[in-house]
Amino acid sequence: MEKKLSKKSLNKSFHNWYYGHLTCFSQEHMQTFGYLCAMLPLVEELYDNEDDKAKAMNTYTAFFNTEPQLGSVIVGITAGLEEARARGQEDVDEETINGLRAGLMGPIAGIGDSLVVGTVIPILLGIAMGMSTGGSPLGAIFYIIVWNLFAYFGMKFMYFKGYALGGKAVDFLIGAQGEALRDAITTLGGIVIGAVSATWVSVKTSLELISKETGEAYVVLQDQLDAVFPGLLTTLFIILCWFLMVRKRMSPIKVMLLLVVIAFVGVLVGFFDPNLTY
Amino acid sequence: MEISWLQAILIGICACLSSMPGMGGSSIGNYTLGRPLVGGLVCGLILGDVTTGVLVGCAMQVVYIALVTPGGTVSADVRAVSYIGIPLAMAALNSYGLGASTAEGTALATSFGTMVGTLGTVLFYGTATINLVWQHIGWRAVEKRQYKKLYLVDMGLPWISHLICSFIPTVIMCKLGADVVELIKISLPMDGLAMKTLFTVGSLLPCVGIAILLKQIVKKATDFIPFLFGVVLAASMGVNLVSATVIAGMFAIITYNLKMLLLKKSADGVDDDDEEDI
């Protein structure tokens, strides 16, 4: 008998993923339970026998975590593969499915973070904040609508694309073409993140050297730094944080605590001063 | 400003929905309700002052515009920023008699947001830890082949984690809010060392968010060039974010085509070698 997944169960599977991928998150099994819930409607439709169901569900008990929006494509691909396995295609077994899931998690998380979290969200928020200057709710409403349409239909597209392409999607994603695509997206992400940081992050020093004779500042450090490279101080702090996390393997929390110390010392010596009074 | 029980409860429910891992799912919860800009609108609606809410939300959004959680590393908790920080900051502005659109008001909102956001990471680890219990129940259900129970485990039981780690802390902080703010106001004068440090930390912390994104993209020193290019676009050339994205897209296309060309060439190169062998 030719087994084919109905549109209804595919939709149910997609919605289970769309909503539930992170609801039961723990450090041990991040998105595993979301994945199980996404596969359940499919497994129930494909197999009548309880043992077959158990065997199929067992496949998806392996650890899973990726960037969830773009990661929909992986769930879609496994939906296609599970269908192929139910039809009795011999080269699809638990090992191939899990090998593929493990192999895709990393690259998809890399592209997803620079594309979704690093590019789309900051840009939408940037536009929205411009619209909300002065306290207008318009920007927030704009963000709610545009982001949710993008996320819902984007994830749906990825899921069904993955389902339609099945194993072929894998060659595309981790093959040579996929690598070129990844490089292109990280270039895009890098440039946009740079623009985001220069637009929205501002580290400024208040250090000035004041001449004793005239009482006027003859060195304003912030202006000097900006003359070298606009946004130099902000950029240096970002690179310092990157250096501490990547090269010194410090956790983000530790880096933040270090910044608190830097801020404290900076305020003490007069390097930082937000100039606040009542 | 007094926050009523009903208002505190509504804000508490939003906190459950919006956290990472939250009950709204990551698209609607974490990435929509959890964004401080949206949180500002929601808190403004609940507390009856949309303009102040959005202004405070905007100020905090600047800090967390690039907040990412790669591999479950959380450097700030959005439920705490949006649903503890914003109501408290609104109460603070009210009691200081500061306008939300003034530079001082923005700085105050920023530092309140960063303070609770950083402390709030405790809530994130708390939620994830309690979820381990539900996941344990889930594994037993899988063993016993009671697959329907997975829905309860993934989408039902985590509500209990949120009752403990999101709802109760938020309601308590909102109810205590005005008193906490009053206490801070008396014990920490604005031009004192502690407040100055807090404001400075507020301007330094976004660097960590940007650095976490760069962690995914930058592996060696030359990978910083696209990022610096983005900084130059925005800071030196005054290009806005949308335009910067178009320019970045252009470079992405060039990168992609170059990579594909190289791949094609190396594939041809292999063929040439074969012919010489013959």
Image: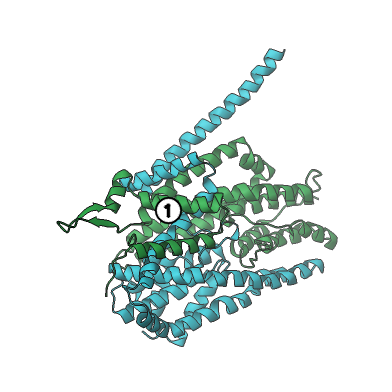
Chain colours: A green, B cyan
Q: Is B167 situated above or below B109? A: below
Residue at x-position 78% and y-position 70%: B140
Which amino acid does the dot numbered 1 rest on? Phe
**Label 1: which residue?**
A237
Q: Is residue A36 left or right of residue A226?
A: right
Q: Chain of mark 1?
A: A
Q: Tag 1, which secondary structure?
A: helix
Residue drawn at x 62%, y 65% is A20
Q: Taking A27 as reference, is B169 above or below it?
A: below
The quarter of the rendered structure image containing the C terminus of chain A is bottom left
* Residue B158 percent location from the top left of the image: 63, 73
Q: Nearer the viewer, residue B96 or B168?
A: B96
For image coordinates 33% across by 57% down, the residue present is A204
* Nearer-the-camera pick, A200 or A148: A200
Residue at x-position 48% and y-position 39%: B222
Picture quarter containing residue B89?
A: bottom left
Q: Residue B184 location in percent, x, y?
A: 39, 80
